[in-house]
Image (spheres, rainbow, N blue to C red):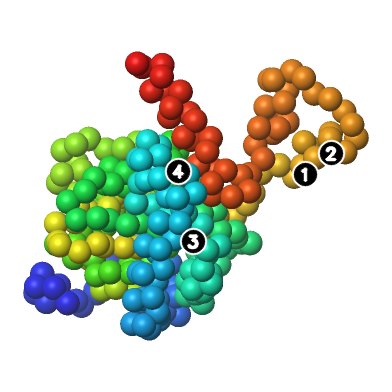
Amino acid sequence: MNESARTLDTTVLTHGIKRSAPLTTPIEQHIEELRIKGFTLVDSGLTAGEIADARTKLDDIYEVQADEVGGEANLKLMNDANIARAVCAYDPLFLKIATLPVIMQISAAYLEQYVVLMSQNGIINQPSTDHYQFTWHRDLNYQHFTSSRPLSLSALVALDPFDDVTGGTYVLPATHLVEDFPSDEYVVNNQQVVTCPAGTIIFFNSMLFHRTGRNSSAGVRRAVNHIIVPPMLRQQYDFKGIFEDQGVEVDDPAVREYLGFAYTLPKSIREWRAGKIDAALAEQGAVA
Ligand SMILES: O=C(O)CCC(=O)C(=O)O
């Protein structure tokens, strides 16, 4: 408990209230926090040994993935330095983390429908080094709307302590309920930094504005983020596959795009990154 919590009056008396929300299960307390302020903290239940293992494995996977694309310089080129992607496909410990009972329970209770893992990314926050995640963002990038029910849940598992020195996670409470990014003045006056021990999961509505805190310690500060969504906005069937099976050619680029021909999912992290590296190189060429 922090100093200000210790001095707060914790009796809850009301008047003029006809509707309120009594809690019946501990999970509901977390769902209520997610609904109102947009984030909540839960212990993952991982052992100290598993957390230590996950730290080493994350660093190893990052090295492997940097090699896959011809070196870290290419990751820097596409703003993907110090991020390890789809780590559950590289080591079973990360599949265990992605499917932790508490992650499955809270995502089912919060999203209230069938959900899938949209992404799982390791964040490697190196001391005194810039990271793409230092800048404010929503995990559903470029989206500026609110919804009466949540669309997506992020589950950020701290693998190192998040504190004032290693860098907590900065959040703007309740901004999952507001369309636009607020003014700089609002950000400065209302940002909150979430700190927690290693092994904690920071769950947040993926539309909450947040960012990684700067790491001014001497060590690396690592985390794994999961974005969990109901897969409702996707094609109901594979038009591209159906057209190909029928031997039907579609030449018009606009029609190909409309039918989702360009939307096949990358089959590997190397393939996912290849397109982005090509785009970054093309942009550099255009500027030069
Ligand atoms: O590392 C953190 O504190 C936040 C990570 C983050 O912003 C993200 O994964 O989207």
Gap between marks 4 and 3 measured at Cα:
19 Å
Give the SS element for disc 1. loop
Of badges 4 and 3, the one in the foreground is: 4
Q: Is there a contact, CB below 8 Å, between mark 2 and mark 1?
A: yes
**Could you say whether the residue bearing mark 4 is in a helix, strand or loop?**
loop
**Quick one: label 1 or label 3, which is nearer the N terminus?**
3
**For residue 283, above or below residue 100:** above
Of 13 and 83, nearer the camera is 83
Residue holding disc 4:
70
- The residue labelled by disc 1 is 237
Of the two numbered discs 4 and 1 on the same chain, state the one appearing first in sequence. Answer: 4
Which numbered dot is residue 242? 2
Mark sitting earlier along the chain (2/1): 1
Give the amino acid type for the residue marked by disc 3 in the picture: Val
Residue kind at label 1, given as amino acid type:
Tyr
In the rendered image, which quarter contains the N terminus? bottom left
Q: Nearer the viewer, mark 3 or mark 2?
A: 3
Q: Which mark is residue 87?
A: 3
Q: CA distance from mark 2 to mark 1?
A: 8 Å
